[in-house]
Amino acid sequence: MAEWSTAGWRAEAVAWLDDALARRGVVRCGEVEQPRVRPWATVLCAETSAGRVWLKASGAETAFEAGLYLVLHEVVPESVLEPLAVDAERGWVVLPDGGASLGDVSGLGDALVAYARMQRRLMPHVDRLLAAGVADMRPEVLPRRLSEAVAVVGGGLPAEFADGTAARWVAEWAAELAASALPASLDHNDLHPDNVLTGPRFYDWGDSVVAHPFAAAMLPLSVIGDGLGEAAAVEAGERYLAEFTDFAPIGRLRRELALARRLGIVARTLTWARAAGAAPEFADAPRLTLLSLLDEPRP
């Protein structure tokens, strides 16, 4: 974070941006602004002869996002912004302005259906997603990931995490989900209205993981439930599952959705832990997230 605020880093980034634009025949028309500096990433923006562009520079733990854009734009170009330039080694990506985000929960159900269709197209490309640096949170590895989550949270956890109860539940749920007929796919892991552009197109992939596809529904269904009520969340979940009914009967899909939503807590805990390590204001978020693994009713 300190590096991104230095004149030297900014000069290097602006020079790279100008060179990347020039290779596309695009000219910067104004000063480069730096509207956001976060512990995990910063963004620069500038007006150009082709419209506004954004340079996102990510920290080491989310640097994979830059290279991930190349895979996504190749496989599902209508679902993401086109990367205008990528330096995967440094975690830098230049994107065109994507316009307005949903910003409101009312359109999130439709976006979730579109996301399901995108997930299906990405299923044959999981090896490429992993090679790009996306974290593996498939059911088979979740027992180990739970151990990592408990370790990073540290103290303040109830007895279920010390006596093996939580580990046993996760192992049982993960084994059941690992037997799913659905291949793994990409879980955005932060799919809320501000990360969905009209279209819909999806962006801000720095928290994404490879997982059972239904894990991606965990956050949006919770957001819909909080904003529009539980009945709306159930309806949105049914519409999402309808995109996968060729894999298994609807009853089985509902069961897997319940399992994936609960097991997705493990990945969310590790994501929060990464943020908390860089931003003290999120210090308690990993613990609170992990505690929800014990919520009743359990799957």
Image (tube, helix red, strand yellow):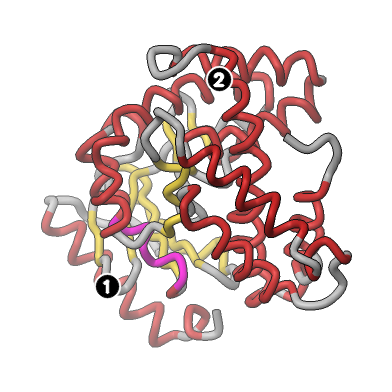
Q: Looking at numbered disc 1 in the image, what kind of residue is underneath it?
A: Glu
Stretch of the chain drawn in magenta: 61-67
- When the figure is inspected, residue 158 is found, relative to residue 260, above or below; the finding is below
**Between 298 and 207, which is closer to the camera in this rendering?**
298
**Between 214 and 87, which is closer to the camera in this rendering?**
214
Assess disc 2: are there few (<14), some (14-19) or many (≥20) residues with their C-alpha within 10 Å of its C-alpha.
few
Percent from the top left, x then y, of residue 231? 78, 14
Label 2 or label 1, whichever lies nearer to me, is: 2
Quick check: is 230 in the magenta stretch?
Answer: no
Answer left or right for 22 relative to 73: left
Percent from the top left, x then y, of residue 29? 31, 55
Assess disc 1: are there few (<14), some (14-19) or many (≥20) residues with their C-alpha within 10 Å of its C-alpha.
few
Answer left or right for 76 relative to 8: left
Name the dominant secondary structure of the magenta segment.
helix
Report, in whole angstroms, how far the alpha carbon at label 2 lies from the one at label 1: 42 Å
Residue drawn 65% across the image and 67% down it: 149
Quick check: is 66 in the magenta stretch?
Answer: yes
Percent from the top left, x then y, of residue 252? 55, 20
Q: Looking at numbered disc 2 in the image, what kind of residue is underneath it?
A: Arg
Q: Quadrant of residue 247?
A: top left
Residue drawn 62% across the image and 25% down it: 255
Percent from the top left, x then y, of residue 87? 25, 66
Residue drawn 33% across the image and 73% down it: 13
What secondary structure is marked by label 2?
helix
Residue on which disc 1 sits: 89
Residue on which disc 2 sits: 252
Instruction: Pick the quarter of the image with the N terminus.
Output: bottom right
Instruction: Pick the quarter of the image with the C terminus.
Output: top right
